[in-house]
């Protein structure tokens, strides 16, 4: 009996042990993080994607740091948040100088368990590493040795001669030539760098030169990698011939690791007045191959102005273009689109790759971009400061866009959409047509899907007479979009719409909430349109739309909107203070427009582009 009882007790104990082990295992599943790549060497100002993988939790989100700093800094490099629509992919932008020490850490930290992380080691080095520097001067000769004391005369001769790892320094003066690249750099020897001689300003001038098809004053046609073009003034290239497209810097093909830095590109001109013929561009990056893309591109610190681009754009990344940064550029006084990321135009031979994607567009200044002076558009407004035309997975943040016609995320091609664009912490004011628009412009084109518009500040938009519409527009085929934490201030434009959703193509085009709306006509007299129905009054709009339940109608109390330069921070007592909803760092970002922490120490967030 004792033996039998004892045996029974042992059996019960084993069953309990098995059950407890299962329960303990379920309760202590280990979160782990891996990062790819985990060890790289890259050049200053290079762009590099990283991907983090989280296991052991249904919450797979991560927070990104560089050397322990969320988002990084200028000394050690910057890292984006996770790009919307990706599986924990972020973009790293290396610093402009080699740090000390030269290796930095890029870390992905699990949001489910902040004690778990993975780190990549990134070693920063100079782009061109052969140590060979050649010189070009207007007083030189192409039969010379290319040394400082015996420089060459033309940049083209340098392009014909250099090898991977070499640097070409061009002295000040005017170079009336089209420069066609012949050789690539590579990951072993390094970049081929074309740059200004220190302290001097070389000018590549297209006066009298003829574009043969689409032609750049700097031209890369084919497969090119590890190229830097830096510190040039590029100007005065024009055409009045159909099919002859002048471009400042033109890259058509495939390749990787391209840097376009600190150039001044202006007066690139197409004089024709018909949209099927009139094209010119300041910078064109066209991914024309597949599956090979143009990837890992940095466009930084350039000034682009006074170009007459006809039906084209000042800056166009189009087709099979992936992993890019557009940062700290100033684009102004143009008669068509400022910055454009494009898809579905047949630029890539494979439609699966025909889309600019996985980019980071930040801290650019875009102004005086309007088609009202464009001979093609005959006094119509329609030039975007920033345009995502069929792009996907782009972060657009901390940009200043003003006195342009509009900015938008949409697609001009039926059956296609712009998707997974994060538009946050930007300032838009004095737009002629509308501050910000999503959705296709007609029922015959595409739309906008899964785009997020958060924490932007908009003011005094729709200024162009009866053509000016107002602040926010929702057009055809907009689906699964989010519009939250924005200040939408029509100021004294009391006959303009604060929100204009004029189609019924989609019953619920966006979720809107936690916004602050205002204009001087007051809440009761404010104008709205929801699902093609015009509405007067904020509360009537809330009822009709079932949107903006937590939003307010109140003066945001901008610090200064009476004299230029305007200040769109909010003053003490603003209804925007701590009134937003904290959607998490991957949605609202690490920094506000001014570079301060986006969320305060108590987890609160302002409505609008500024935190305090």
Image: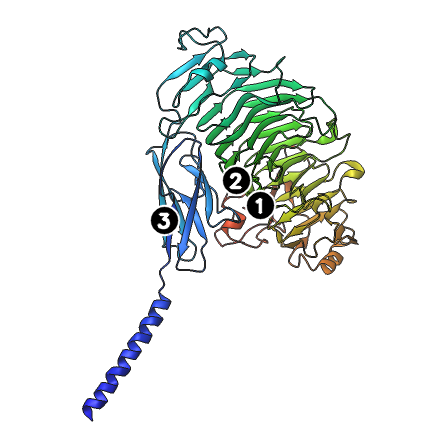
The total number of labels drawn is 3
Q: Which residue is mark 2?
A: 359
Give 429 or 46, whichever is nearer the viewer.
46
Mark 1 or mark 2: name the one nearer the start of the chain. 2
Q: CA distance from mark 3 to mark 2?
A: 23 Å
Q: For the point 72% across and 45% down, which residue is it? A: 444
Res 166 → quadrant: top left
Res 104 → quadrant: top left
* Proximity of marks 1 and 2: CB atoms separated by less than 8 Å: no
Q: Residues within 10 Å of mark 3 (few under 14, many from 20)?
A: many
* Secondary structure state at the residue bearing disc 3: strand
For residue 391, side relative to residue 459 (left or right): left
Q: Position of residue 141 (x, y in %)?
A: 46, 6
Q: Position of residue 247 (x, y in %)?
A: 60, 23
* Secondary structure state at the residue bearing disc 2: strand
Front of the two marks 3 and 2 = 2
Give 240 or 601, whichever is nearer the viewer.
240
Q: Which residue is mark 1?
A: 421
Give 256 or 205, whichever is nearer the viewer.
256
Q: Which residue is mark 3?
A: 118
Q: For the point 65% across and 24% down, which residue is it? A: 307
Res 405 → quadrant: top right
Q: Which quadrant is the N terminus positioned in?
A: bottom left
Q: Residues within 10 Å of mark 1 (few under 14, many from 20)?
A: many
Q: Is residue 196 above or below residue 42?
A: above
Instruction: Residue 9: give its label.
Output: none
Mark 1 or mark 3: name the one nearer the start of the chain. 3
For residue 576, side relative to residue 539 (left or right): left
Q: For the point 41% across and 30% down, which residue is it? A: 44
Q: CA distance from mark 1 to mark 3?
A: 26 Å
């Amino acid at each position: 009996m004792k033996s039998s009882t004892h045996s029974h007790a042992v059996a019960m104990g084993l069953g309990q042990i098995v059950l407890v082990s299962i329960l303990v295992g379920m309760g202590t599943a280990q979160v782990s993080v891996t990062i790819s790549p985990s060890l790289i060497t890259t050049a200053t100002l290079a762009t590099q994607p990283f991907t983090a993988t989280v296991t052991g939790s249904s919450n797979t989100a991560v927070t990104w740091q560089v050397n322990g700093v969320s988002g990084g800094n200028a000394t050690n490099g910057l890292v984006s948040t996770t790009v919307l629509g990706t599986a924990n992919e972020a973009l790293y932008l290396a610093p402009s100088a080699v740090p000390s020490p030269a290796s930095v850490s890029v870390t992905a930290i699990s949001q489910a368990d902040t004690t778990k992380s993975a780190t990549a080691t990134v070693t920063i080095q100079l782009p061109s590493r052969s140590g060979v520097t050649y010189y070009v001067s207007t007083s030189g000769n192409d039969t010379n040795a290319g040394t400082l004391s015996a420089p060459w005369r033309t940049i083209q001769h340098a392009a014909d001669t250099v090898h991977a790892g070499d640097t070409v320094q061009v002295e000040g003066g005017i170079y009336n030539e089209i420069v066609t690249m012949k050789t690539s750099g590579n990951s072993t020897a390094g970049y081929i760098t074309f740059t200004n001689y220190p302290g001097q300003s070389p000018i590549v001038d297209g006066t009298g030169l003829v574009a043969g098809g689409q032609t750049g004053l700097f031209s890369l046609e084919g497969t090119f990698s590890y190229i830097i073009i830096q510190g040039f003034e590029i100007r005065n290239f024009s055409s009045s011939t159909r099919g002859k497209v002048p471009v400042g810097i033109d890259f058509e093909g495939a390749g990787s690791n391209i840097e376009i830095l600190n150039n001044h590109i202006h007066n690139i001109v197409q004089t024709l007045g018909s949209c099927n013929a009139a094209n010119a561009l300041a910078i064109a990056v066209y991914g024309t191959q597949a599956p090979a893309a143009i990837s890992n591109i940095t466009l930084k610190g350039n000034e682009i102005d006074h170009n007459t681009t006809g039906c084209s754009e000042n800056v166009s990344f189009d087709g099979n273009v992936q992993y890019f940064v557009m940062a700290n550029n100033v684009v102004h006084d143009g008669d068509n689109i400022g910055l454009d990321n494009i898809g579905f135009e047949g630029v890539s031979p494979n439609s699966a790759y025909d889309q600019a994607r996985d980019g980071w567009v930040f801290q650019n200044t875009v102004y005086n971009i309007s088609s009202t002076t464009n001979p093609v558009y005959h006094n119509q407004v329609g030039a975007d400061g920033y345009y995502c035309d069929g792009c996907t997975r782009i972060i657009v943040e901390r940009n200043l866009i003003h006195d342009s016609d509009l900015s938008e995320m949409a697609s001009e091609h039926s059956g296609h959409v712009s998707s997974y664009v994060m538009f946050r912490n930007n300032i838009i004011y004095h737009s002629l047509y509308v501050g910000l628009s999503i959705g296709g412009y007609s029922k015959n084109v595409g739309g906008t899907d899964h785009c997020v518009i958060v924490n932007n500040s908009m003011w005094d938009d729709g200024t162009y007479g009866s053509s000016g519409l107002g602040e926010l527009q929702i057009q055809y085929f907009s689906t699964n979009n989010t519009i939250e934490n924005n200040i939408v201030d029509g100021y004294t434009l009391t006959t303009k719409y604060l929100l204009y959703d004029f189609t019924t193509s989609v019953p619920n085009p966006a979720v809107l909430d936690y916004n602050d709306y205002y204009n001087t006509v007051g809440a009761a007299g404010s104008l709205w349109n929801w699902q093609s129905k015009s509405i007067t009054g904020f509360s009537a709009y809330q009822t009709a739309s079932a949107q903006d339940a937590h939003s307010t109608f109140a003066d945001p109390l901008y610090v200064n909107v009476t004299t230029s330069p305007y200040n769109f921070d909010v003053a003490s007592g603003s209804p925007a203070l701590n009134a937003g909803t904290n959607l998490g760092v991957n949605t609202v970002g690490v920094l506000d427009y001014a570079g301060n922490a986006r969320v305060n120490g108590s987890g609160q967030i302002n409505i609008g582009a500024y935190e305090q």
